[in-house]
Image (tube, rainbow, N blue to C red):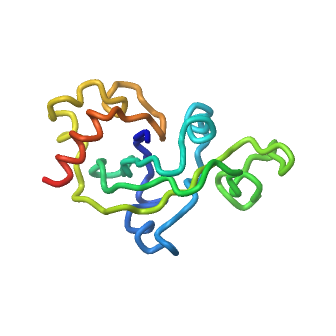
Amino acid sequence: MRHWLMKSEPDEFSIDDLARAPRRTTAWFGVRNYQARNYMRDDMKVGDQALFYHSSCPEPGVAGIVRVSAPAHPDETQFDPGSGYYDPRATRAAPRWLNVDVTLVAKTRLVPLAELRAAKGLQDMVILKRGNRLSITPVTEGEWKAVIRLARG
């Protein structure tokens, strides 16, 4: 099993939205970065767990834990002309964008970015590196354990 960090803007889709979703599951839609798409397509497996990270908000940070519950499949938003994620070059025969499904494991206390930056053992975590803009990044076993300890507070 691998571990990941998956970023979402809470005004677009928050941990609370996931908690209210049917079966507490959603497609991780709207990813429009090739590296993040490739992680979902090539590396993420059913059963992997991820930190659900609120980004681009007044207090960014880890807000919960999710589990990958379905393998990569076409992101339906790419085919919808009314969606902000529409891609006119995508076709059903040759989709450009994929997503996995995730299921809520647990909401946690918010672990703010500042607390992650200050925590021992997280200095190499991808989310903390300058210039990182990826919405999905791998998390090492040591980083996973450290963030889970922080979340339990």
Q: Residue at x 71, y 57 (%)?
A: 76
Image quadrant assignment for residue 128: top left
Q: Is residue 133 left or right of residue 59?
A: right
Counting labels gives 0
Q: Is residue 2 left or right of residue 93?
A: left
Q: Residue at x 17, y 54 (%)?
A: 152
Tell me where residue 85 appears, x and y as whole percent.
Answer: 66, 51
Q: Residue at x 35, y 25 (%)?
A: 130
Image quadrant assignment for residue 141: top left
Tell me where residue 19 appears, x and y as whole percent.
Answer: 40, 70
Q: Nearer the viewer, residue 27 or 55?
A: 27
Classify 38 as above or below 31: above
Q: Nearer the viewer, residue 104 or 118?
A: 104
Tell me where residue 51 appears, x and y as whole percent.
Answer: 36, 48
Q: Nearer the viewer, residue 12 or 75?
A: 75
Classify 13 as above or below 30: below
Pick the quarter of the image with the N terminus. Answer: top left
- Residue furthest to the right: 93
Classify 125 as above or below 62: above
Tell me where residue 110 appears, x and y as whole percent.
Answer: 24, 55
Q: Residue at x 59, y 36 (%)?
A: 33
